Image (cartoon, helix red, strand yellow):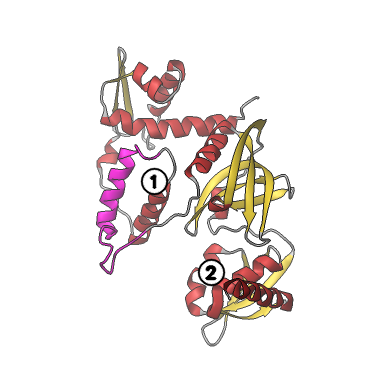
Amino acid sequence: MTESPRGRLGKRLGRILVMLPYVIANPGVSVNELASRFGVKKRDLIEDLNLVFMCGLPGYGPGDLIEVAIDGDRVYVDMADYFKEPLRMTPAEALALYAGAAALATLPGMEQADALKRALAKLGQAIGADRPHAPAGIEIQMESGAPQHLEKLQRALTDGTRVKIEYFSATKGQLTERVVDPWGLIAALGHWYLVGWDHLQSDERMFRADRIKEVESTEEAAEVPADFDPDRYRGAFRGAGSTTLTLEISPSAARWFEDYYPVVSSSPLEDGWKRAELVSGGDRWAATLVMRLGPDVRSVTPESVMKEARSLAGDIAANYS
């Protein structure tokens, strides 16, 4: 199997980002130890360090670049001067960074990420996340499913290989077997999602990790689009389909709705509500959305969506009766 340039670049960048904090925390660590710890050949490791030496801000004077020194078999890294300046963020930026780092910390293999833990603790203290009972208390919860499944998915992403999964579809209530080319793991709306090409449906799909029942690795190469952009999936849905859904949403829901769903157009109404038009993945998906919004939605068209929502509500009520 020939590895794509994108795959090699992703591996190299990931290795550098993990390696740098370790070298900074352990000045004088040997090349052999680094190569062994991060599972890389010495030649590739030295190439990585030479690349880091070229990183910095325009100006590229001694204080603008990350300084890397290899003295014999010992490695030393000094960060550029601008890293010594305290990072200034808005409260929203700090919260977004904290949420993203907390989600990352839940992944398998991050148990020993001491630098991440220390950074989370400091940032959490600054924004009040260490005060769960205070008004400013913040709690990040991620539903990730079985850790061994995430480990296999991470390995497949790293190796650029296809996976076979057993997946429970909440919209269809069925357990199906899928062959998937994995593109990425995305944290959205409190869950981890596998994004990739589903060979069963011949289309891109998002699979909630906690609904994946089995994962089997394969040796087949996965194809990843050159323009794959994780940000397109931040709302756990990317519009796919030809059905147009029109609905009116309340002022409270309108504050976040357009950030999470593929809204084509929206317009304010006189009473503060907002009319939104979006691409629907089908009546079943649209009905689930309507039920999730509850009292925050009205005037839904087409009528087939409301019919599906009533049927779905009846099925749920029957299960709990």
| Residue toward you, 283 or 184 | 283
Q: As drawn, is 240 to the left or to the right of 86?
A: right
| Residue toward you, 228 or 141 | 141
Q: What residue is shown at x 26% (from left), y 66% (from top)? A: 133
Residue 113 horizontal/vertical position (percent):
34, 38
Query: What residue span does the magenta drawing correspond to?
Result: 110-139
Total of numbered circles in the picture? Answer: 2
| Residue toward you, 178 or 318 | 318
Callout 1 crowding tier (Cα within 10 Å): few <14, some 14–19, many ≥20: some
Q: Which residue is mark 1?
A: 105
Residue 131 among those drawn in magenta: yes
- Sequence-wise first label, 2 or 1: 1
Q: Which residue is mark 2?
A: 257
| Residue toward you, 184 or 199 | 199
Residue 16 horizontal/vertical position (percent):
41, 31
Residue 297 horizontal/vertical position (percent):
57, 79
Disc 1 is placed on an element classified as helix
Can residue 65 be seen in this snapshot? no
Can residue 131 be seen in this snapshot? yes
Q: As drawn, is 315 to the left or to the right of 13?
A: right
Disc 2 is placed on an element classified as helix
Q: What residue is shown at x 50% (from left), y 31% (from top)? A: 11
Q: Amino acid at mark 2?
A: Phe
Q: Is residue 280 above or below residue 227?
A: below
CA separation in Å, label 2 and label 1: 27 Å
Quarter the C terminus occupies: bottom right
Q: What residue is shown at x 30% (from left), y 45% (from top)? A: 119
Quarter the N terminus occupies: top right
Callout 2 crowding tier (Cα within 10 Å): few <14, some 14–19, many ≥20: some
